[in-house]
Image (spheres, rainbow, N blue to C red):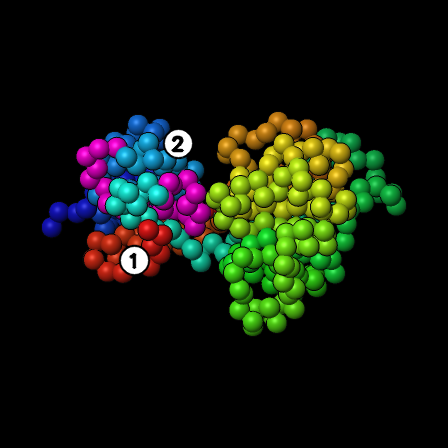
Amino acid sequence: MTKQKVFITRRWTESVESIARDLYDVTLNETDRPLTADEFKSVLQNYDAVCPTVCDSFPAAVLNVENKRCKILANFGVGYNHIDIDAAKVNKLIVTNTPGVLTQSTADIAMTLLLMTARRGAEGDRLVRAKKWEGWCPTSMLGSNVTGATLGLIGFGRIGQAMARKAHHGFDMNIMYFNPSDVDEYVIQDLNAKRCNSLEELLSQADFVSLHCPAGAKTKHLINAETVKLMKSTAHLINTARGDVVDSEALIDALKNKQIAGAGLDVYENEPAIHDGFLALENVTLLPHLGSATLETRTAMGEKVLANLAAYFAGETLPDQIC
Ligand code: DGY
């Protein structure tokens, strides 16, 4: 039987690449470099399925290309703000994602950033490497306590809740959240979590604010020059969601002017470019979008993509269909 033609836009972990090759007639971007819009148009015209990932941009201008053979974009990643979903619908393209399997590793990175920014971990590492450390003294490099502090989560879905569990049960943190929809009562009780009725309420009370909302028109620059002002001057901002949720310029100003104490970022507007303003600051910890970057998680994400493809080609219900 002829195998379906599948295009994979970036390298996957070895085991899932190998399963994909066994199942399909796979073309893999062996160079692992980001592909161009014209290359994406061409793969849409020549393959039955395309498996993009979170750094591949599929705007309407790409999705509207004529003579498409592709019927499904099986995305490697839970976020899908890089795909114009309205344009995908117009073009009758199915889009799937990989929720669930990266919850814990992403929450781990959020917690890592929280600890690093609170305890000035990256700054301390730079000091030691630069051979500028002059030894222990009672007032050097003082950070903020994590244990017992208040964590405010904006967005309280899978990843936000996983972060809250680590923070509450591991570090005895008080949990508050701001979320558009209702949250299961047992989750609230387990975490003794307080629901905030407004963003203002959360921002003004939390010692650490962690973003876990999806990117989109409603959340673009949710943290901006006005909202960042509502945070305590001792507070820290953590972003493992998407860069667009934060206005970089406003955050840089707030960090520079010590309007807030620090920030820990894993995601950026216009990745992989980083605003130069961040690079000059000591009170921001910068990670290169490591949220799901463990061998186990990336393999599980590949398995999810393959499960979606298998269901599609078998004409079955797709496990993770966005549209
Ligand atoms: C995702 O899947 O959306 C994550 O950001 C990748 O780490």
* For residue 70, side relative to residue 172 (left or right): left
Q: Position of residue 89 (x, y in %)?
A: 30, 45
Q: Name the residue under label 2.
A: 34
Q: Earlier in the sequence, mark 2 or mark 1?
A: 2
Nearer to the camera, 132 or 311:
311
Q: What element carries label 1?
A: loop
Q: What element carries label 2?
A: loop
Magenta residues (range): 65-85
Residue displayed at 68% across by 28% down: 280
Quadrant of the rendered image containing residue 48: top left
Report the magenta stretch's main SS: loop
Q: Which mark is residue 318?
A: 1
Q: What residue type is labelled 1?
A: Leu
Q: Specify the farthest residue to the right.
A: 138
Residue displayed at 71% across by 46% down: 230
Q: Is residue 67 magenta?
A: yes
Q: What separation in Å lies between label 2 and label 1 (alpha carbons)? A: 27 Å
